Image (spheres, rainbow, N blue to C red):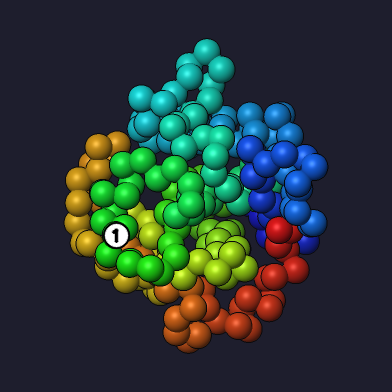
Amino acid sequence: MLLYEERLYLGIGRWNLPLDKKPKNLVRLAPKKKYKIYRFWYDVYYREMGRNRKYVNLDKKMLIDEFEPNSDCLYVENDNAIVGTSRIITNDMFLGYYYNFYALDLFGQDSYCVVTKYMVEQSNRSGILGYILALATVEYCKRKGIRWLVIDCSPIRYDYFAKLGFEEHLGLAHSPEYGEVKIMKFDVFGDTQCPLNDPLMMKKYQQLFRF
């Protein structure tokens, strides 16, 4: 279990970005690193939870869906192993079925993103790693000027996201992949009293971000 902040490493990889256009300080994922993230998704979603069978490659033990490789993915790595991810699909990327399923047109001219594959390795779920990863996701969106962060969660996780500052966007819906989910939204430039917009907490953990 991760106990020390200095052992955490957060980075971001834009997998379809040409090397000659790589922004300063961006940590680009090499092919080997990309495989490790896809394998992590396979381990959590397929082996542990028995989901996402449609996108599973059993031979390579990877989970790759229609949104790859054109997405941004925050990841946490410890001892050369992926222990957490948060994938960000912005409104200038391919959104597929999410556009209608999340009724993203309701945001009008506001910028938004869809967050998926927000997950932490099993042995780290009782610690602070999930919160740090959520903080990093919000900070990334702030730097990109993205106002709304949209996510779906199983009803048993509603309280977790509500405590972070999320509110209902559409309420309950039926996901073709996960069954009953609750669709929620977060205002990145909203109330500074909520945990994910708290400037003191952001200052405390910002040293861990590498994007």
> Label 1 belongs to which residue?
105
Residue in view at x 66 percent, y 45 percent: 13
Characterize the local packing of mark 1: few (<14), some (14-19) or many (20 or more) Cα atoms within 10 angstroms.
few
Residue in view at x 69 percent, y 52 percent: 11
Can residue 138 be seen here? The reply is no
Looking at the image, residue 44 sits to the left or right of residue 84; the answer is: left
Residue 23 picture location, percent across and down: 75, 54
- Residue farthest to the front, as pictured: 109
Name above or below for residue 123 compared with residue 35.
below
Residue 77 picture location, percent across and down: 69, 47
* Picture quadrant of residue 166: bottom left
Residue 49 picture location, percent across and down: 38, 35
Looking at the image, residue 63 sits to the left or right of residue 52; the answer is: right
Which quarter of the image is occupied by the C terminus?
bottom right
| Residue toward you, 2 or 37 | 37
Residue in view at x 42 percent, y 73 percent: 187
Residue 92 picture location, percent across and down: 48, 52
Looking at the image, residue 159 sits to the left or right of residue 25; the answer is: left
Name above or below for residue 149 compared with residue 88.
below
Q: How many tags in the picture? A: 1
Can residue 49 be seen here? The reply is yes
**At label 1, which amino acid type do we have?**
Asp
| Residue toward you, 155 or 57 | 57
Residue in view at x 75 percent, y 46 percent: 21
Looking at the image, residue 78 sits to the left or right of residue 178; the answer is: right
Q: Which SS class for mark 1?
A: helix
